[in-house]
Image: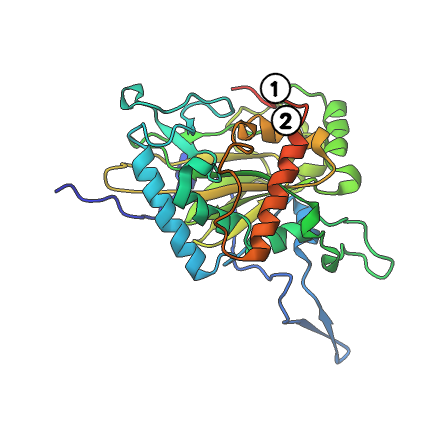
Amino acid sequence: MDSEPVITQPPDLTRLHNSSSPTVPTKLPSSSDTTTTTTNANDTSTSQEPPSYLSRLQKDGFVVIPNLLPPHLLLASQASCKYLIQRTRPGGFWPHVRTVPKQYPPWPKYETPDQNLNIWGIQHLLHPHLTNLRDIFAEIYFSNEVLTVVKQLLADPTPSTSSSQPDATAAVPDSALVMELFNLLISPSHSRPFELEWHRDDIRPTATAAQELALLAAKAPRGRQLHAQYNLALTEDASLLVIPGSHRRARTHTERHAGQYDPLPSEINVHLNPGDAVFYDSNILHRGVYTGIDAERELGRMTLHGSVGLKGYGAERSRQVLQHAVGEWVETPGAEFANVQDEGKRARAEAMRMALIEMGKGREHVGYSLEG
């Protein structure tokens, strides 16, 4: 009997990338930490609260949050994703995939084994045709653990009169949230590595510096996040490279003239342990480096990739969301989240789904943000 692939830790992904990028530790202080930092100055002790998630995101363009998923959700998601990957790789079970070497949508559907597609992602985890698997993914996407952070990051970053930092207590309410995307990022098979080029999610590389600044301002009015985007690792993951602070400025001369996969000054390799998450501004310069695996023996990377929107900004968000074809199924029979057991969470999920439907009205032909 053939042995079943097991969950493994991916190899050191930085070997594919000829640089000495520093890594980000996952054990950062959270916004709910109660510990204080004490310094001595003339024998006087002072305490300082750690910066909020929103403050870190505003400053750096990303924030790592350790142990976001509690053990029961981590185990459930690991098992569900392992099953989904093993059924999808041969072709025919789930057609909505991201294929190597294509970086951006649209991707071909994976419908038969003779297509021989190598995949690096699985799309539409909230699709009603995923039935029982969808129920597990809905529990995670609409969970208090994830959405509590989302609501902080979508708050107005304008400091209050009494503080120089964004106020974490000014989180947006559930009624302000829009369901967007929930996908799975995985390791390509056949031991074939795959790299994504440096990019911002909705600004083309041909933009001039002046155009970049205008677009960045439009996509983050007064510095406010219009959506919260995250990678939630289910196995160890060091695939994401980011340039801290690049979400608020045009590219430098070096960044503009570098090759698509070249090491860049100040780049950071974000390292996540199982259950950790990184929330990042999609305007930040970033890319992914994927190690290929032997899918007969390894499972490799399993990282949930999600986004949640802020209501009232459909004109800005619609292309980034609808280009992934979520509008094709969000109104179909069975798309309701009737199987979410908790009544409050079920009401939240339905309200967010309806907000996505409303955002998509009249926007059937939105085009694509990037090409390739």
Q: Position of residue 50 (x, y in %)?
A: 67, 63
Residue 23 is at least partly visible in this image: no
Q: What residue sits 34% from the left and 44% below the top?
A: 82
Secondary structure beneath disc 1?
Answer: loop
Label annotation for residue 319? 2
Secondary structure beneath disc 2?
Answer: helix
Looking at the rendered image, the quarter that the N terminus falls into is top left
- Quadrant of residue 369 in the image? top right
Residue farthest to the front?
333
**Label 1, on which residue?**
367
- Quadrant of residue 360 in the image? top right
**Toward the viewer: 350 or 211?**
350
Are the residues tagged 2 and 1 within 8 Å (C-beta)?
A: yes
Q: What residue sits 68% from the left and 37% below the top?
A: 247
Position of 154 relative to 119 (above/below) = below
Position of 136 relative to 262 (above/below) = below
Numbered marks: total: 2
* Separation (CA) of disc 2 from disc 1: 7 Å
Q: Position of residue 264 (x, y in %)?
A: 57, 34
Q: Earlier in the sequence, mark 2 or mark 1?
A: 2
Q: Is residue 193 left or right of residue 337?
A: left
Q: Amino acid at mark 2?
A: Arg
Q: Position of residue 359 (x, y in %)?
A: 67, 32
Q: Is residue 239 left or right of residue 251?
A: left
**Toward the viewer: 270 or 116?**
116
Position of 107 relative to 288 (above/below) = above
Q: Position of residue 101 (x, y in %)?
A: 42, 23
Q: What residue sits 77% from the left and 48% below the top?
A: 156
Residue farthest to the bottom?
43
